[in-house]
Image (cartoon, rainbow, N blue to C red):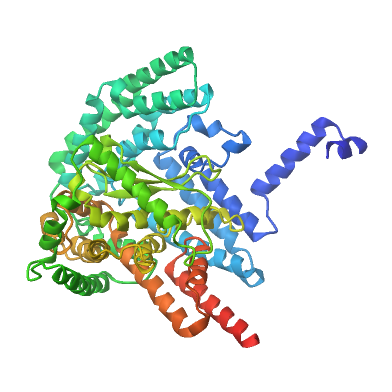
């Protein structure tokens, strides 16, 4: 290309100017292709978030690392800009003639339109209806986790960027404080227990000597792994320690002081019904997380029915194993899984064995699903424990997606705070949900679909994502990986746990149950360990509606699978059904319904043609 320009007599300066003009047009001007416009809208969004760019890790392969020394702007002004940008992006994308788009582009059009409409509604009316500092995903725990699990270090420059990010914690936390004070003015305060738990966590965090803090210890490990010289390490570690002591800890102390003063003004009312227009807020959250039009009452009744059905199936297995099934299911299941044969030693060695066994479970099923899936992700998945500084308030497990450039695998995090909460009969089901064929298969595979626009490769639709995770537990059983009666009992208990969530989430936020009432219901009906039951209920309180996405999504996938079986008969292949569900990325359930029905119609037309 340079030779062509020289032959035309174009100078190097003119080439640069032309490149700038082309880039500006591509970034700001009208684009002839809808997919290009969609990718541009997505990139405009993520380019405003240095932390998201680090999570995706898609620019580093091109030598672009300018985002690595910065943190997200969490100010109210930034939120205003984001909302304005969202409205403008929606306007631009809706300007395309849907009738002239391809099938996949029409799907993208409808998916993005669905998402933008709800995001704008949430930002317009419910912007401050959240608790930025909370025991589950609050910034006070997310920041150290981000630095430990996301910020990669391969050079001295990367390490300097790490310390630069630490130097900006005070700015970010002060921006978040703006929003906390607005919430206080509006009467949007977290329940008392949330403030107490977060204070306990932050006080322990700042009381930790800097060299024992995860921000220092994980940094040192990364320096060692990167092969950075001892001389450079000495300087980098000294600066890291200085930033922790002079920037990070004072920033946390600001939150501690604020929450300490706020504590007397909080109450033990836990549901969002207590907030201004709380009932309307909850109804909207439920619709957003389930990507459907279900009402709180419908979800509550569905949960009660599913709890009864699954408990009946569990009693059949328990009776066959010689247990007294007249007792409450929760009590009986906890007793069974508390037997010595099902519990790991409460030692470092016992915890390491849990990690080893989880990895073996994933490796085993990964080679045994040939008849069930044609599409598989290229990236692998590893098992790690939840960082110890946050394990007391974290959920039992969660999944982190791989980097888009392949530099980081998927990670299944398991909480090893209480080994009794990880009984052996439950482990297979949890591994299948978080790893294979659950979240890892779905999320990693979606990210690898290079023919899809970027926004569809990481769609934020919880009912689909979590519904697939729960459906995957059942698929593993159907594929023969949970034939032991106790493993099957663990599978059913996991499904029961998600059915109980329907009852509890609506119970807390719609029927005004207390936290204690919700914990008691879970203990009696689900079989979860007490520590896990408390963490779970506390999770539902700070994430209204999210816990309902699992069962709603699973039931929709099963409904569509039965429809496909009935419609296609002998032409139905489970692997093709799974390909159809997975290859389009995460979508709202209403659009998943269309995708599967279109596939059925296509298969039927192919059959008629032959």
**Residue 218, above or below 267:** above
**Residue 265, above or below 231:** below
- Residue 19 location, quadrant: top right
Numbered circles on residues, count: 0
**Residue 464, above or below 207:** below
For residue 465, side relative to residue 270 (left or right): right
Give coordinates of residue 67: x percent, y percent: 52, 34
Give coordinates of residue 214: x percent, y percent: 33, 29
- Residue 205 location, quadrant: top left
Q: Give the residue displayed 41% in from the left and 51% down from the top.
A: 363
Q: Give the residue displayed 51% in from the left and 21% down from the top.
A: 156
Give coordinates of residue 500: x percent, y percent: 21, 64
Comparing 582 with 382, the one in front is 382
Give coordinates of residue 587: x percent, y percent: 47, 64
Residue 388 visible from this viewpoint: yes
For residue 338, side relative to residue 379 (left or right): left
């Amino acid at each position: 290309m340079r030779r062509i320009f020289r032959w035309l007599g174009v100078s190097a300066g003119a080439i640069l100017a032309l490149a700038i003009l082309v880039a500006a047009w591509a970034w700001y001007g009208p684009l002839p292709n809808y997919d290009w416009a969609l990718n541009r809208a997505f990139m405009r969004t993520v380019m405003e978030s240095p932390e998201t760019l680090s999570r995706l890790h898609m620019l580093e392969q091109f030598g672009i690392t300018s985002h690595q020394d910065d943190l997200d702007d969490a100010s109210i002004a930034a939120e205003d800009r984001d909302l304005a940008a969202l409205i403008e992006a929606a306007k631009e994308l809706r300007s395309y003639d849907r009738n002239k788009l391809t099938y996949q582009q029409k799907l993208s059009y409808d998916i993005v339109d669905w998402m933008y409409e709800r995001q704008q509604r949430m930002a317009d009316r419910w912007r401050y209806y959240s608790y930025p500092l909370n025991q589950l995903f609050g910034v006070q725990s997310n920041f150290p986790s981000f630095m430990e699990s996301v910020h990669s270090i391969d050079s001295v420059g990367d390490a300097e960027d790490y310390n630069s990010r630490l130097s900006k914690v005070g700015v970010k936390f002060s921006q978040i404080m703006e929003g906390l004070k607005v919430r206080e003015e509006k009467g949007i305060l977290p329940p008392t227990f949330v403030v107490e738990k977060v204070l306990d966590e932050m006080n322990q965090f700042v009381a930790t000597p800097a060299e024992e803090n995860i921000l220092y210890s994980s940094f040192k490990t990364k320096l060692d792994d990167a092969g950075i010289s001892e001389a450079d390490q000495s300087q980098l570690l000294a600066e890291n320690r200085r930033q922790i002591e002079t920037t990070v800890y004072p920033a946390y102390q600001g939150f501690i002081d604020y929450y300490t003063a706020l504590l007397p003004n909080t109450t033990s009312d836990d549901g969002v019904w207590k907030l201004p227009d709380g009932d309307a807020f909850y109804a909207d959250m439920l619709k957003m997380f389930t990507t459907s039009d279900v009402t709180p009452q419908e979800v509550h009744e569905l949960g009660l029915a599913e709890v009864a059905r699954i408990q009946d199936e569990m009693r059949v297995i328990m009776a066959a194993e010689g247990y007294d099934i007249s007792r409450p299911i929760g009590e009986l299941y906890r007793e069974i899984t508390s037997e010595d044969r099902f519990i790991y030693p409460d030692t470092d060695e016992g915890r390491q064995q849990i990690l080893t066994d989880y990895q073996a479970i994933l490796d085993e099923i990964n080679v045994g699903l040939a008849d069930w899936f044609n599409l598989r992700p290229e990236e692998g998945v590893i098992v790690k424990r939840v960082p110890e500084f946050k394990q007391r308030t974290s959920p039992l497990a969660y999944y982190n997606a791989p980097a888009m450039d392949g530099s980081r695998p998927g990670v299944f995090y398991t909480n090893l705070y209480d080994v009794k909460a990880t009984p052996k009969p439950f482990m297979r089901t949890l591994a299948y949900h978080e790893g294979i064929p659950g979240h890892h298969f779905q999320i990693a595979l979606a990210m690898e679909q290079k023919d899809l626009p970027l926004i569809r490769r990481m769609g934020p639709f919880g009912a689909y994502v979590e519904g697939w995770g729960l459906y995957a537990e059942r698929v593993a059983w159907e594929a023969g990986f949970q034939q032991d009666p106790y493993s099957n009992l663990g599978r059913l208990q996991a499904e029961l746990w998600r059915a109980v969530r329907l009852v509890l989430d609506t119970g807390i936020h719609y029927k005004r149950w207390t936290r204690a009432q919700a914990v008691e219901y879970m203990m009696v009906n689900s079989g979860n360990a007490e520590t896990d039951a408390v963490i779970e209920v506390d999770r539902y309180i700070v994430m209204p509606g999210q816990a309902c996405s699992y069962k709603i999504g699973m039931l929709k996938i099963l409904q569509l699978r039965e429809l496909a079986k009935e419609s296609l008969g002998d032409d139905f292949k489970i692997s093709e059904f799974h390909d159809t569900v997975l290859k389009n990325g995460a979508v709202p359930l209403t659009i998943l319904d269309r995708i599967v029905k279109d596939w059925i119609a296509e298969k039927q037309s192919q059959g008629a043609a032959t």
